[in-house]
Amino acid sequence: MKICVICGTKPMEIKFAKIISIIFQPLMMPLLTLLILFNSNTYIAFSISSEAKIAIYIMFITFTVVLPTLIFLTLIKRGIISSLEMPEASERRIPFLVSIILYFALYYLLRKLALPGIVYLLLLGTILSIVICFFITMIWKISIHMIAVGGVIGSLLGLSIRLGADFILPIYLVVLLAGFVGYARLKLYAHTPAQVYSGFVVGTALMAGIVFFV
């Protein structure tokens, strides 16, 4: 099998790493947390009707996936960012601001629904994570992929303690996912090991602390 001359990695490994990075991009992680929570054996899952869950899913997909993607593609077309990967730290500032605005809009709309407080707390924690990423990016290129997947793990850890619920299996599966995502970011030379590990620690600690202590 041929070896990639530029990166010293087999082409199949590069392809796999790209697929992992695209499928499990940061935009998808809040939705993943919501899916796990709404399908858990907790009062939160039982207190929200199926119709309301569908409406919330649609709102989340619209404001955290569809609209950001469309705006980012527009930024690429205008030459403000080079790609959805945003390889340079300086390229990420405007997308972060866009994400913060969209998440606040989502929070405002969801506040009109009578949802359990933990749902709003998770959303505010995500907004805080983006704000922290925004300031870190001004001086250093931390891994947003790892902050996002770490945030899912931190949320589940906090929820398991706060709600006394069994999230062991989802936590194990997301930890495995985090390993694949970290591997992908390193294989693509998108980040250094320090940027990957620190992103995971920041995301996990931040969301676990917010869910458990706030």
Image (cartoon, helix red, strand yellow):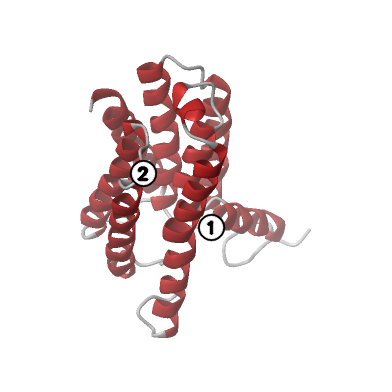
> Residue 19 in the image: x percent, y percent?
63, 56
- Quote the CA–CA distance across marks 2 and 1: 42 Å
Mark 1, other Cα within 10 Å: few <14 / some 14–19 / many ≥20: some
Q: Label 1, on which residue?
A: 188
Q: Residue at x 60, y 58 (%)?
A: 18
Q: Is residue 42 above or below residue 60?
A: above
> Residue 93 in the image: x percent, y percent?
27, 65
> Residue 178 in the image: x percent, y percent?
51, 39
> Residue 63 in the image: x percent, y percent?
42, 59
Give residue 209's quadrant in the image.
top left
One can see residue 109 in this view: yes
Helix, strand or loop for disc 2: loop
Mark 2, other Cα within 10 Å: few <14 / some 14–19 / many ≥20: few
Quick check: 27 left or right of 122?
Answer: right
Give residue 191's quadrant in the image.
bottom left
Q: Amino acid at mark 2?
A: Leu
Give residue 104's quadrant in the image.
bottom left
Q: Disc 2 or disc 1, which is closer to the eye?
A: 2
Q: Label 2, on which residue?
A: 113
Looking at the figure, which quarter contains the N terminus? bottom right
Q: Is residue 16 above or below residue 30?
A: below
Q: Is residue 104 above or below residue 44?
A: below
Q: Is residue 126 above or below residue 40?
A: below
Helix, strand or loop for disc 1: loop
Q: Residue at x 34, y 41 (%)?
A: 198
Q: Amino acid at mark 1?
A: Leu
Looking at the figure, which quarter contains the C terminus? top left
